[in-house]
Amino acid sequence: MTAPPPSVWTTLQILGSSTDFQTKVYRNDTAGLYLWVSYVEPMVDMEFVARSIFPYLFHCPFSSLEEIHRALPIDDAYISSDPNNVKEKLLEGYLFIRLHETDETGLLVKAQKTLERALTVPEVEFSVVGPKESFIESLETNLFLLRKRIPIDRLTVKMTTVGTLSKTKVAVVYIDGIANPDNVQTVLQRIEEVEFDEIIDSSYIVQIISDNRHSPFPQLLDTERPDRVAAVLAEGKVAIMVDGSPHVLIGPTTLVEFFSSFEDYFLNWTVASFFRLIRLFSVTFSILITPMYVATLNYHYELIPKDLLGTLITSRREIPFPPILEVLFLELTIELLREAGARLPTKVGQTIGIVGGIVIGTASVEAGLTSNVLLILVALAALASFTTPVYKIGNTIRLMRFPFILFAEIWGLLGVAFCFCIIVTHLLYLTSLGRPFLSPLYPPRWRDLKDALVRLPFTSQSKRPETLRTEQPIRFDGKKAKQKRDIDE
Amino acid sequence: MASVAERLQVSPFMTFFIIMSMQIGIGVLGFQRIIAETAGHDAWISVLLAGASSHLILILIYWLLQQADGDFVLLHQRLFGRWVGGVLSLLLVLYFAIMPFVVLSTYIEVVQVWMFPDLKTWEFSLALFLLCLYITFGGFRIVVGICFFCLIIPSYLVFTFWFVLDYSDFYQLLPIFDHSPSAILKAAKQMTLTMLGYETVLFFYPFIKGGKQSAKWAHAAVLTTTLFYTLLTILTLAYFSENQLQRQIWPTLMMWKVVELPFIERFEYIGIANWLLIILPNICLGLWCSSRICKQLFSIRQKMALLVITTICFFCTLWIDDRAEIDFANTILNRAGFYFLYIWIPCLAGITYIVKKVRGNV
């Protein structure tokens, strides 16, 4: 037995098994007609319907759907008899109006309820200066925020739907004529190939379409700042916006981009470059300091000068554990504090921070479980790991420390160097949308270094990043921007 | 020309980093004593001479590569037939396969003497060879990436020699030309061994985009290495007296001992740990070259060749572990390198020239 072809009638029957699906019959007295109006109640803005649709429905004289269509002052309305289309639109919050209960053709009228929170200040990527708006969960609003900043016709949006259950709308945004078509094609193709049922957030997408799905390093940058997205689109990158997610993905990205805060562009280039170098230093420090402690105290105490050695010995005299246990104990404590702080409401979180930081720290030193020198180092390392402007790379850095500690325990400084080589190799393997992840360091793109470890002034940023292979590599006339003047002119 | 897809190629100026990272290796830790033994305080002249000769050989290498369309293995076969040419290339496989394990054994020896007397050779060499497999399986681009970072990152060590300046006496270099030309030449010959490494260009040449343009970068690399070695030799000669120098196996490590920082003493520990980065390109590129020649010779998969060669290298490091044996292996490798570069390459150039005159093409 073959199933009968789906008809609008059966579709409505299936929908009708939910109690929130309504079909109501109204009578238009002027024309003497009955109207069957179906809708999914939670999705429809009833106030809007009562105000803008019903007055026309009940008081205008008409005899066919076409006449209703003409009479209604609503743009998004059309007549349809395709059962799939009707089902989809009903679930999005359209009204379906028929003249008879058994009609296969009806008028679809948009009456969607839109509930969204107001635009807020960016919380993850807060900046003291610069714009203060961040993306929200609605794709339309996010696109509005972006279009407002790039009001040109070449800003192209390609929409697709992913997720068999969630039917999540995904928009791929780029500037036509600047972004490399290969990059756009790669993104579009990977998004089409996504096989998953319920896409909740852009972080689902990033895990599915990344070049290397097992790497702890994020290979697409995620941001909640419309200004940042606008800026990188102008550089020739591609943005992926997901409905229901306040975070937008940007690719192709590079490792150094994860250490550049968007605030760098709001400050003078000297200050910004200084901050970037500080951040790089703090990341290196954060990863290496506790492994160094383990290596030095286990194997190379000769490395420490005599005066410093005294301090270290005094602090460690009473400690019954080898350095590795001491370090793991404290590192895990910090991780626990962070994890607990992240899960708790803000107010309680602060209390936990104080309890953890002061009580556990001081107590463990006084109890003779850890040395106070190590306590300082671990706390500094934790602090340094929070200087990363992108949240996700901070997590990676905290994870990175543990293999280093283990290798330092096995082979001391040699182990640290060894682990370093492994990680460099891993980074060399990584690509972001097929472009090398370590660029512009390797393969070296000298010109791109103007905005990597340091940020040079805007006048010298006249070319787009070479790594992206953009269609239009020149941003503006660099010579005009940099007019040279002689003395006293 | 052996066709290599463009996405696998690297830009010509990477040749600079590849060659330099190959040239600077484990030899830097101790070459000064050997050349000072014959040429005394004139040893720095020998370094310059060795550098100059390297440039000449490099010119010949590039000439040969152009005659052979970039494929050295094919050149052997065209000149000497399939079998003899094959055997000659096989010798090169052996040469590049010996290099990784000699370098690693020497390094492990340094580590055991200076840092970890009880470092287990097998543990460390197993881990390191696994790392090298990880690197080389990524192909030439990853190997070059390692060459690049492993030259750039440890380059800060150059600044540590600043501390040595305070204790140096440059009058020790006088009088210049105090030794006979033959002694200086002999030291130059010994020095060529430390300069080895640029011969790898014979095999990675097809992987360079626009191969011919890489010549200037190759020469720049050899020039930089020569200058670096010359300065290091001058500094060593100024720092140690001649008798003192003869008693040091690793003068460079001894020089680091005077580095004084408020938070670090015994700087040579940092230096030795960093030296892992310096030797890594030597091992990886050696493995890559030998497996690449294997692939061309026997048409087997390069992964297979790599696995076999690395396993053999690993067992060799286990088998050769005392000072005398390592020294012997070093001598063999150095002699092979010397004969290959200074005898075989000029001969081959001569033969190619004659064949070209007679046959019209190679």
Image: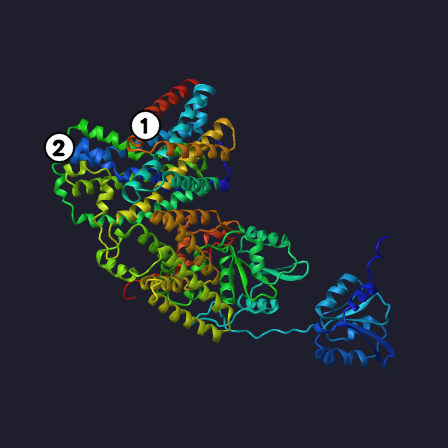
**Chain letter belonging to callout 2:** B
Q: Is residue B10 visible?
A: no
As drawn, is B172 to the left or to the right of B51? Answer: left
Residue type at mark 1? Ile
Q: Earlier in the sequence, mark 2 or mark 1?
A: 2
Dot 2 alpha-carbon crowd within 10 angstroms: few under 14, some 14 to 19, many 20 or more: few
Task: State the image coordinates of residue A260 (x, y, percent, origin top left).
Answer: 43, 61
Q: Are marks 2 and 1 on the same chain?
A: yes
Task: State the image coordinates of residue A82 (x, y, percent, origin top left).
Answer: 79, 62
Q: Quadrant of residue A96?
A: bottom right
Q: Name the secondary structure under disc 1.
A: helix
Q: How many marks?
A: 2
The residue sitting at 22% across, 40% down in the picture is: B251
The residue sitting at 41% across, 33% down in the picture is: B315
Task: State the image coordinates of residue A430 (x, y, percent, origin top left).
Answer: 49, 49
Q: How far, Cα to Cα, is label 2 from label 1?
A: 31 Å
Q: Quadrant of residue A384?
A: bottom left
Residue type at mark 2? Asp
Which residue is labeled 2 in the image? B178
Q: Nearer the viewer, residue A90 or A284?
A: A284
**Chain letter belonging to callout 1:** B
Q: Quadrant of residue A90?
A: bottom right
- Residue A267 lies, with reference to residue A287, above or below; the image says below
Q: Name the secondary structure under disc 2.
A: loop
Which residue is labeled 1 in the image? B332
As drawn, is A348 to the left or to the right of B218? Answer: right
Q: Is residue A363 visible?
A: yes
